[in-house]
Amino acid sequence: MNVTEFFRGNIYNASDHGGIADLNASSNLNKIISVLIIVILFITMVSLGCSMEVYKIKAHFFKPKGVAIALLAQFGIMPLTAFCLAKIQQMDPIKAVTVLLCGCCPGGSLSNIFSLALQGDLNLSIVMTTCSSFAALVLMPLLLYIYCRGFPGLEKAVPFADIMKALSLSLGACAIGIALNHYKPSYAAVIRKVGLSILVISSIILAILSSIAIKDTLWMALTAEIVRTAALMPLIGFMLGYGMSAICKMNSRCCRTISMEIGCQNIQLCFAILKVAFPPEAIGPMFLFPLIYMTFQCIEALLLALCFRCYQTIFKTPAEDTGKQDTAAIKQGGEITAVSAEQMTKLCWRQEEELNATY
């Protein structure tokens, strides 16, 4: 069944849902928005790849507990949370598929920033984001198919082929970034800086054009059930992610990192799929749901970071449990030098590579 025919036949009504068919007066505007979304996704994933170093991936492959827990929680907790919220509130198919799509997305790069704010393990956060992005190529379509079966006919209407194309684009961009950082690290540093500037400018332009495109129907995306869902999803992800990590006996630093990874979804990918894979007249103003989700995601993560800093100030010394005391003593040139755990790991990998090259 064609996705446009399904949504139009089941729920689409211009007067009730304010579909972008009314907003489609300028097809050029929609094309510009679609291109900008793809550009933002591409830059975000290349920058993520440029932050990833091969030795970090190797180190976590030998100790995969944290990454395994994060992947299990990411593709277990969030899709199930999205499905339950959609069913409990009896959402119509287009709202349900939008919420499910957001819930099935991999972790986003914002989790790296919030992990840093919560003094988590930044290296673990970057590795988890990268691994979940690659795992999403298989797990995201599979989970969408499984959970869409809870809504009659929806599993036949979801454009899985177009979703796979968007996922392939994001993974290809991430792989390019990893390769650049490995073979041309000087280029990777420039790309991260320039990419951030382009990303900020593109995001501002996208926000302006999107507000122009949906200025008359913005209120239709801000219904009580959508706002409630956007507020609860990241909060549940943060809480259950931390709880699951604690049950698995991870240290508090890793628990905070995994918590941020689970609650922070890849909003850029969700935007791209909704805008590119679904026809504008079918998705309507619901393509703004990722933006609403991101707003609550950032507010809640910042509040958690503020609470953590207050707790740390009152009950603990600033250096406690931050990982700053994770040092080791090594002998270099006859002197004992203190290095961080990260530096120690990197040094070990370099020594191993030198030995392999020697033999």
Image (cartoon, helix red, strand yellow):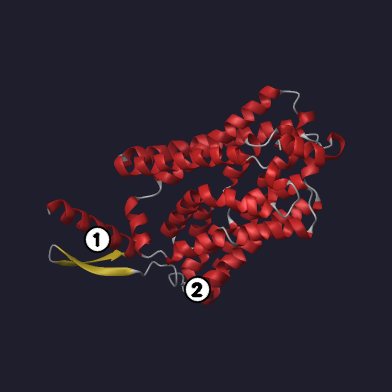
| Residue in the picture at 46% in, 51% down | 130
User: Is the residue under label 1 in contact with that under label 2 (CB below 8 Å)?
Assistant: no
| Tag 1 residue | 348
Residue drawn 53% across and 42% down? Answer: 167
Q: Residues within 10 Å of mark 2 (few under 14, many from 20)?
A: few
| Image quadrant in which the C terminus is located | bottom left
Q: Quadrant of the N terminus?
A: top right
The earlier-in-sequence mark between 2 and 1 is 2
- Disc 2 marks which amino acid? Cys
**Mark 2 to mark 1 CA distance (whole Å):** 28 Å
Please indicate, yes or no, whether residue 118 appears anywhere in the rendered image.
no
Q: Secondary structure at mark 1?
A: helix
Image coordinates for residue 125, horizontal then vertical, percent: 46, 57
**Label annotation for residue 248:** 2
Q: State the residue in front, 97 or 26.
A: 97
Does 294 sit left or right of 319 as displayed?
right
Residue 63, x across and y down, in percent:
37, 65
Residue at left 40%, top 67%?
323
Measured from the top left, where is residue 75 in percent x and y?
57, 58
